[in-house]
Image (spheres, helix red, strand yellow):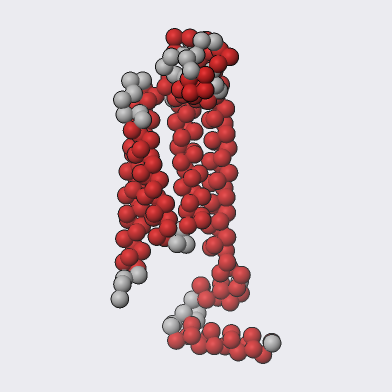
Amino acid sequence: MFIEHRLSLFESLLIFYSKGTLLSFEFYWIINKPSLIYIKGGIVVLCIIIQFGLAAILLLFSTLAAWYEGSAILDNPWEWKYSTPFSQMMYGQVHSKSHISQLDYFVYSAKFHPFFPIIMAISSLYLLILIGYYLLKPQNKKFACFLFILGGGLFLLGCFFMDSTTTGGKIFFYIWLVSGSLCTATAITTYFQVLNRNPRR
């Protein structure tokens, strides 16, 4: 086994010599640190894990903050008719605080205190794309399809905010519009890059 290892190393030396890289720093580094061929992939995975953790923490914090700010709807009965879609689906017309669903806290917060709901939306979207990238990137066509479907969903979501009269609603309309456009453009670009790399014969 020792002899086979030396022979394979000798063959590698010949290959590198033929390419003029025998004395290069990169070759010396590979010979002395063979495990470094795995470092690049490990760094990519580590970066994804760090991004995932930071985005998840940001999502959790912004969700709690938006929920707290949205609880102000309990003290604004004049908004119960316009900012409680989930409560109205469950109970019909809302007449008391006990009928208000906590999901409507986020609706109220998005309409009148949109800062933390915007962070919620962006961090959620980032997490979703990050997961799709990690799972589907090796199959670039699947990742492109994922982005295309996601972009269509974001456009559809933006339609619900198209006629909004509140500041938060207008901001969310543009967020979904821009995000959908970016996802769609990236999907098309990725798809054609795959076609150029793998032309049909």
So how many labels did they put on this image? Answer: 0
Residue 101 lies, with reference to residue 160, above or below; the image says: above
Instruction: Name the quadrant of the C terminus.
Output: bottom left
| Residue 44, horizontal then vertical, whole percent | 53, 57
The residue under the point 39% across, 48% down is 149
Whether residue 187 appears in this view of the structure is yes
Residue 60 lies, with reference to residue 11, above or below; the image says: above
| Residue 64, horizontal then vertical, whole percent | 57, 27
| Residue 48, horizontal then vertical, whole percent | 54, 51
The reply, left or right, for residue 168 in relation to residue 8 is: left
Taking depth in this image into account, of 12 and 41 the one nearest to the observer is 41
Instruction: Name the quadrant of the N terminus.
Output: bottom right
Q: Say which quarter of the image contains residue 170.
A: top left
Going by the picture, which residue comes out furthest to the right?
Answer: 1
Whether residue 104 appears in this view of the structure is no
The residue under the point 33% across, 33% down is 159
Residue 143 lies, with reference to residue 56, above or below; the image says: below
Q: Say which quarter of the image contains residue 8.
A: bottom right
Residue 182 lies, with reference to residue 116, above or below; the image says: below
The residue under the point 58% across, 77% down is 31
| Residue 141, horizontal then vertical, whole percent | 40, 60
The residue under the point 47% across, 57% down is 136
The reply, left or right, for residue 187 in relation to residue 91 is: left
